[in-house]
Image: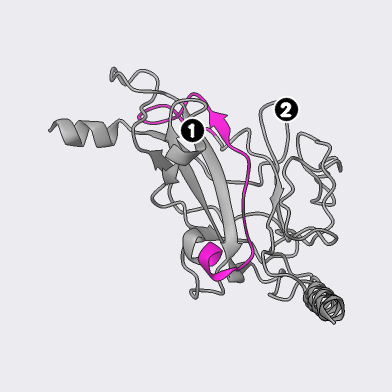
Amino acid sequence: MAGAMGLLAQGELVFNSDIPGTSAGVDIVFHVWSPQVANPSVEATGNSSVPYSGTLRSGDFPTGTQTYTGTLIGGNTVGTGPTGWANGNNYSVDVVAAPGDNAPVSSLVLVAGSLTTFKTSANGAGFNVVPAADLSIPGTTFSGSGISAPTSASLAIQAWYSGGTAFPTYASAVAAGMPYGQGAEFNVDGLGGGSITPPNIANAQSFSLINPIPEPGTIALGVMGACAFLARRRMLKK
């Protein structure tokens, strides 16, 4: 009985990255981008410096200072990436979380039911497909439940190249050297449940994936440098 009560008391939230701003500080819009063009092995985080436009369906709310040079994951505009940035079904996204505010990043664990893909519609680039059910955060509760547990959670969003089902988890993509990224940790307070409406996944920010495999040009430069180094060593030995 106690276990069942604990399960029913879990705090809930809505995993949706596309909630157009209607009142400042309440609604949010953030995106997931392909790797930065000039420096694909370094992840960029933070909301875009482009203000959100409900007409153009672009930009972030609230507006940040980050500049993204990659392509939005999903949508239907073909990008420049080698693994099909425009096909949202080739990429997966999920949520990791822990009870309470500002939990150590190492303590965040996968939230059941959060695994989803990216939208493939013309105006869906960078946005996740909303899971069918609200997310329940283990170890949390909601206001008025009468159970002593945090009513807030620490969360982060993970995204990666899944190739459909080839790399079903974030860890498998990282291990295989596929593009991946994890957004900055953030808090969501006032979790829903019972008669309380679950809140949107507020406070999340945009981020880019990284491409850990060097581009062909980078590999070629590395090989040339190694050859030059070995040639110099041989000359010195003579």
Q: Residue furthest left?
A: 1
Q: Count of labels shown?
A: 2
Residue 216's spot in the image, x, y percent? 78, 78
Residue 46's spot in the image, x, y percent? 74, 40
Please tell me the numbered disc located at residue 23.
2
Residue 99's spot in the image, x, y percent? 41, 30
Q: CA distance from mark 1 to mark 2?
A: 31 Å
Name which quarter of the figure residue 54 lies in: top right
Q: Is 213 in front, or is 156?
A: 213
Q: Residue at x 27, y 35 (%)?
A: 8
Q: Inspect this view and state whether residue 134 appears.
A: no
Q: Residue at x 85, y 60 (%)?
A: 38
Q: Amino acid at mark 2?
A: Ser
Residue assigned mark 1: 104
Quarter in which the N terminus is drawn: top left
Magenta-span inclusion, residue 174: yes
